[in-house]
Every structure is written in structure tokens, then in C-alpha cells.
Image (spheres, helix red, strand yellow):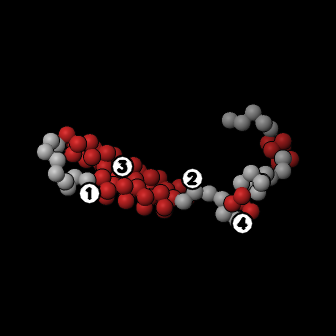
Amino acid sequence: MSSVPSSELEKRPVQTPDPQDEPSAEWGWHGTLPNGARLGGIFVVLVLFGMLIGNQTGHVEDFYLIISGVIMIVLLLLSGRRRRRAWRR
């Protein structure tokens, strides 16, 4: 709950990003790159699983590569699921 009465909120001017502080606001785009982050995550997962192919004799490092890749896949799936439902809020 907000402690500010609604009448005070209506009187406040809408704040826009200052181009001096945030240069990208000047040309209209101001945000993140979610598709780029997702593609980067997929690329990293592929690289992790690609490192399983090699001349390792002990397979302890394989365990860490597989666990790291699976954790990243789960995080990518959760972020995609959250993004799909974001319009409903």
C-alpha cells in the first residue's frame, strides 16, 4: 500500500528519462534486449555441452559442465515462461 494519497499522485508530472543521463532515450529506444540475452544463453549452453567432447580422462569436469548446462536451460525456460505471461499482469 502506498502512503501517498491518490490526489498527490495525480498532481505529479510524468517523469521522462533525461537524454543527458540516458542517451538511448533521445532516439526512442530505452530498455533491454531479451531476445539477445536468450540467444546468448543458448549459445553458452551449446558451448558447455560442446566442451564434453575432448581428451579428458577423468570425468569430474563433465559433471560440472552438465550441471551448469542443465541449470542454464532451466533458467532459460523459466524466463521464457515468465515473459509469455507478462501481458496478463
Q: Is residue 81 visible?
A: no
Q: Residue at point 25% right, 47% down? A: 66
Q: Which residue is mark 1?
A: 50
Which amino acid, by three-letter code, is at mark 4? Trp
Distance from Cα at disc 1 to Cα at disc 2: 39 Å
Q: Could you say where residue 61 lies in the image, as x and y percent from the top left?
A: 23, 42
Q: Could you say where residue 72 lies in the image, as x and y percent from the top left?
A: 36, 49
> Which is nearer the N-term, disc 4 or disc 1?
4
Label 2 secondary element = loop
4 lies left or right of 24: right
Q: Residue at point 31% right, 58% down? A: 46
Q: Could you say where residue 23 lies in the image, as x and y percent from the top left?
A: 72, 58
What is the crowding at mark 4: few (fewer than 14 residues within 10 Å), some, or many (at least 20)? Answer: few
Q: Which residue is mark 3?
A: 72
Label 1 secondary element = helix
> Which is nearer the N-term, disc 3 or disc 4?
4
Contact check, label 4 and label 1, Cβ < 8 Å: no
